[in-house]
Image (cartoon, rainbow, N blue to C red):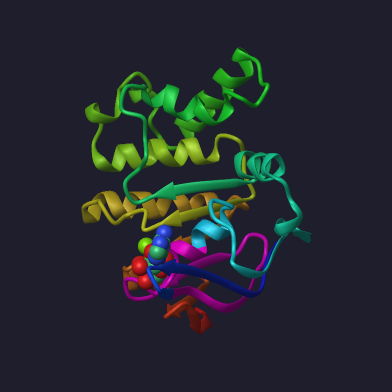
Amino acid sequence: MINLENLCRHFEVGNQVVRALDEVNLIINQKEYVSIMGVSGSGKSTLLNILGLLDTPTSGDYLLSGINTSKMNDDEMAHIRSTKIGFVFQSFHLIPRLTAAENIEMPMVLSGLNPKERQEKVDNALARVNLTDRSDHRPEQLSGGQRQRVAIARSIVMEPDVLLADEPTGNLDSSSSKEIIKLIEELNQGGLTLVVVTHDKQLGRRSNRLIELLDGKIINDNQN
Ligand code: ADP
Ligand code: MG
């Protein structure tokens, strides 16, 4: 479903060029569980942002379900981002003044779904992350693990094909981390393609496939 061909992402900083991604070739199939590891600055977030259509390559191609993303206009990209791709960040990215339920409803606001359908989807997503009893709480009233569960609920509320998670346990204690990993692995078992960036070797080893980046290149790609 994901196919990168000779993909580069270069940043010009002053008179220097940073090769954040350098001639990356990568195929990820539906329902795979892939972890991406590598030292800080190796290009992990850049890769995930491109996979999530949050950023575009400098050169090379990104084909998503056979469609070349470089041929898409902004509206098409936004549509795919909101319906096919879920994104989870290390720092949760929740809106502080909104409740858990309202945060989860956010991606549906422009979807054309009516309030009843939205409510149903929010309730389902809350149940899936086991937070039904916290629906009216704002982020500051939730623990880190609970906040990340709200963020995961938000990311899956539109029933995407792929979940991209950039160090989802980076801000969590070990017991909350375990809970989050268990949750996203369950989602993968339910058929969601899962790509997780992590620093955690143990977590990396749990996936079916471990990709290692260095200086914007894939230096290892192993089935576990
Ligand atoms: P990682 O997530 O593996 O720590 P990143 O993908 O964030 O690495 O960054 C890869 C490289 O690209 C780093 O050298 C970083 O400094 C550079 N980089 C990332 N984003 C930008 C940007 N917006 N402008 C300039 N350089 C960037
Ligand atoms: Mg990063």
Instruction: Look at the image and give the residue range highlighted in magenta.
Output: 18-47
Q: Nearer the viewer, residue 89 or 10?
A: 10
Question: On the rendered structure, is 63 left or right of 86?
Answer: right
Residue 94, given in percent of the width and then of the height, sits at 36, 34
Residue 34, given in percent of the width and then of the height, sits at 52, 67
Residue 5, given in percent of the width and then of the height, sits at 68, 74
Q: How many numbered marks does the figure carry?
A: 0
Q: Quadrant of residue 75?
A: top right
Q: Residue at x 36, y 22 (%)?
A: 99
Ligand 2: give its quadrant.
bottom left
Q: Decide: is 223 above or below 128.
A: below
Q: Is residue 202 within the magenta segment? A: no
Q: Is residue 38 within the magenta segment? A: yes
Q: Nearer the viewer, residue 181 or 61?
A: 61
Q: Nearer the viewer, residue 102 or 96?
A: 96
Q: Residue at x 24, y 52 (%)?
A: 175
Q: Decide: is 183 above or below 36.
A: above
Question: On the rendered structure, is 10 left or right of 179?
Answer: right
Question: On the rendered structure, is 91 left or right of 117?
Answer: left
Q: Decide: is 109 above or below 21.
A: above
Q: Quadrant of residue 60?
A: bottom right
> Would residue 206 be visible to someone looking at this image?
no
Q: Quadrant of residue 206?
A: bottom left
Q: Residue at x 40, y 34 (%)?
A: 130
Q: Residue at x 53, y 49 (%)?
A: 187
